Amino acid sequence: MIQENLLLILALLFGISMLAMLSEMLKISYPIFLVIAGLLISFIPGIPIVTLHPDIVFLLFLPPLLYAAAWNTSWKDFWAARKAISMLAFGLVIFTSTAIAFVSQWLIPDFPLALGFLLGGIISPPDAVAATSVLQGVKVPKRVVTILEGESLINDASSLIVFRFALAAVLTGQFTLMKATTDFFMVAGMGIAIGLAIANVLYLVHKFMPTTPSIDTSLTVISPYLMYIAAEHYHFSGVMAVVTGGLFLSYRSHEIFTYNSRIQAYSVWESLIFILNGLVFILIGLQLPQIVTGLEKYSIFGLVFYSLIISVVTVVIRVVWVFSGAFLSSLMYKEKRLKWENEFLIGWSGMRGVVSLASALAVPLTLSNGIAFPHRDLLLFITFVVILFTLVFQGLSLSPILKWLKIKEDDNEEIEHEIIIRLRMAEAALSHLQSNYMDELSSIDAYTRIKERYERMVDITNRKLKKEEKDAAAALFLPRYRRMLLELVAVRRSELHKLRTEKRYSDEIIRNKEYELDLEEARLNE
């Protein structure tokens, strides 16, 4: 049994790697490609049915994926966009859940309102993994990315809380708005408190204990699980705990990690997130055979009709909420609105993912009295179609919409900030040399050349900031300069390979020099 499961996991991992390479060739975002591939694979005769257990998603996949997304989110940008993020993460989730509840009750025969709220809680949150992964391949304004990623980090908590209360209402037949509201803030607030408490302990461990890069990296992998399990153990929001803890430690990472810990952790996490993302999306596609097993009592036309109507309503609700919410925010907070093209992009980028599917799969098979849970198979099918519709249709249409709306990455400010930072760093280095190495600067050529290098860097950067170099050659200076440095890395690497074939030098020395070139090339390609 263990060997069969291990072989299946290895086959999936190998398939993910192959499909990811194919998606690169076809220029399709790999999450979308993997979902479609998983769906097609599920139709192959003889393919074993792969069951996605909700406990595995919530415990194994969700904590590290949320933690990585939180770690890569700027707290400064997140806080600056907190009003827009809150409007989407809390207001839109509740509004979507309510609208879907009434639409589904009206649309589907014998579908009670409590089940409608349950369906709304399941499909209301855009997925953090889907949003981050799909947006990697397109260039959009930074504020748009900040709002989308910030929303998808928090809305999992609010939607899962709505899901819990709706499920309790179906199972018990009781629902109290006041108690649900109080519990909502208690669950979210205590999740935040637990996440911060554990993050502070980990901060002290990283900062004051004699850790190594391997220990630091291992602790970063363990951290999201500690936060999630601790919060969920006390029936609070594990999602909020992980997100809060991740934001806290990310904001203070420069205080607790050395350069080699950061390099090692980055490499490990990049591989880990690729594997987890790949498994999540291909498993979504592979779920169709399990989902359709209990749908014999529904007609194909009815299933497709209900699912497509609810999918379209879900998309329309989001677009309407984004525009109306932006208008209300501008009136209430006197904030400058984004361009309407950017607001539409935020409204259109509501891809659903694994959290919605895991929530649907977590619906119990029977009620407390032993009767089969009403419409459970229909809930699963509608959720699957909504995920497929939003992820594939909206995800694939992002690039054409960006071209149609002529939305471009707003990088002018970023470029200016990068130049200013480079100038400040060069000036600090020059000041340190002049303060501490005056004798060496006047007598040793190596020191003099370093000083001249930083003086040229300061001079070029100052002229660029003052816009004194307006010709085309000056505008192309930095890209051409970086390309030249990369060419020099390639030349040195080629010479290193020749030295390796001569067999006169230690393999260890060759590997160390190769690693130095790897780091230099990675820095130049950032």
Image (tube, grey):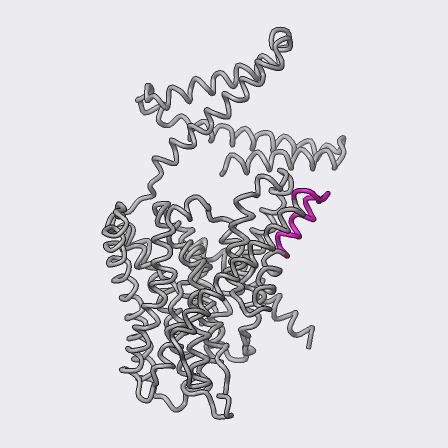
Give coordinates of residue 186: x percent, y percent.
48, 65
441 on left or right of 381 = right
x and y percent of residue 3 in the render?
A: 69, 73
Give the dominant element type of the magenta stretch: helix, strand or loop: helix
- Quarter-wise, where is residue 51 in the image? bottom right
Q: Residue at point 27% right, 66% down? A: 316
Which quadrant would residue 473 be assigned to in this image? top left
**Magenta-drawn stretch contains 212:** yes
Part of the protein shown in magenta:
207-222
Number of marks present in the image shown: 0
For this rendering, which residue is in front, 285 or 82? 82
Residue at 36 percent across and 88 percent down: it is: 298
Q: Nearer the viewer, residue 266 or 150?
A: 150
Above or below residue 92? Residue 467 is above
- Is residue 163 part of the magenta span, yes or no? no
Q: Nearer the viewer, residue 84 or 474?
A: 84
The residue located at (28%, 82%) in the rendering is 107
Instruction: Reply above or below: 340 against 98.
Output: above
The vertical placement of 453 against 166, above or below, is above
In this rendering, position of residue 199 left or right of residue 111? right
Q: Position of residue 508 (x, y in %)?
A: 74, 36
Residue 455 percent coordinates (x, y): 49, 16
Quadrant containing the N terminus is: bottom right
